[in-house]
Amino acid sequence: MIDPVRYLSNISTGVMGFELARASCREGCATTLISGPTLLKPPRGARYFSVTTSRDLEKAAHKAFPHCDVLFMTSAVCDFRPARFSARKIRRKPFLNLKLVRTPDILKNLTRRKGKRVVVGFCLETENLLERARKKLKEKKLDYIVANFLGKGHTPFGHHRTSISLLSKDGRVLSLKDVPKLKVARFLIKIILQDKSS
């Protein structure tokens, strides 16, 4: 929050996370879904926690992580937050200087105590998609990363269809093009269940 009526956010809708939870429940997995503000309805059978800020998400994720075998971190968490919160509504001015500070890298902090858990991250890039995805895969100590591209007429935001590339720590790259997000979710769950059983 910047003041009582304004906030920093992004245009992510949360659909991918909800579809993953739906696919997970369908496979009979005990599923916890943590989500920011949304009008989406959580799937039946999932434990659901609603959060508002990046700090809320950080607390909820750290609380849930020790009890899970697999983590899908689909959330598009703000990388910055206002340095100060104004308790009163900021009045209209010719201009406003807004100082931002970095938010913690929740996923990177979680994987420091990863153990045998399978952790799947997501990234969205506007250029050098696979190169940047590989860098994040390594830096955040992930097992997989789902790479999304934004640009050239394609956006994953607000749509129920998308194109993704799945990169694994062993070098595999699998791609799906222009498919429903539920199909992406089922594809990811199937791969992870195979990974856990092998």
Image: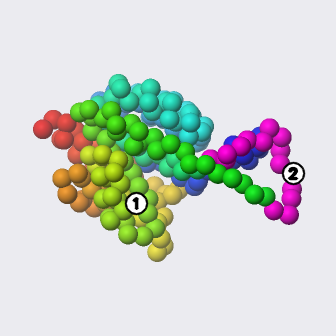
Residue 4 as seen in the image, left or right of residue 190: right
Q: Give the number of the disc on residue 133.
A: none
List x then y, in percent, for residue 121: 36, 48
List x then y, in percent, for residue 87: 80, 38
Which residue lies at the image location 54% right of the left edge and 50% below the top edge? Answer: 79
Residue beneath disc 1? 148
The residue segment tinted magenta is 81-95
Viewport quadrant of the N terminus: top right
What is the spatial separation of the Cα atoms under label 1 and label 2, in whole angstroms? Answer: 38 Å
Q: How is the image coloured?
A: rainbow
For the residue pair 144 and 105, the one nearer the viewer reads as 105
| 87 in magenta | yes
For the residue pair 147 and 101, the one nearer the viewer reads as 101
- Few, some or many residues within 10 Å of mark 2 (<14, 14–19, 20+): few
Which residue lies at the image location 52% right of the left edge and 36% below the top edge? Answer: 57
List x then y, in percent, for residue 154: 46, 68
Which residue lies at the image location 33% right of the left edge and 58% below the top edge? Answer: 135
**Is residue 184 visible to us here?**
no
Where residue 110 sits, quadrant-wise, is top left
Three-letter amino acid code at the position of disc 2: Arg
Three-letter amino acid code at the position of disc 1: Asn
Helix, strand or loop under label 2: loop
Residue 119 as seen in the image, left or right of residue 172: right
Viewport quadrant of the C terminus: top left
Q: Give the number of the disc on residue 91.
A: 2
Of badges 1 and 2, nearer the viewer stands 2
Furthest residue in direction left, as rendered: 198
Furthest residue in direction bottom, as rendered: 152
**Is residue 28 visible to us here?**
yes
| 152 in magenta | no
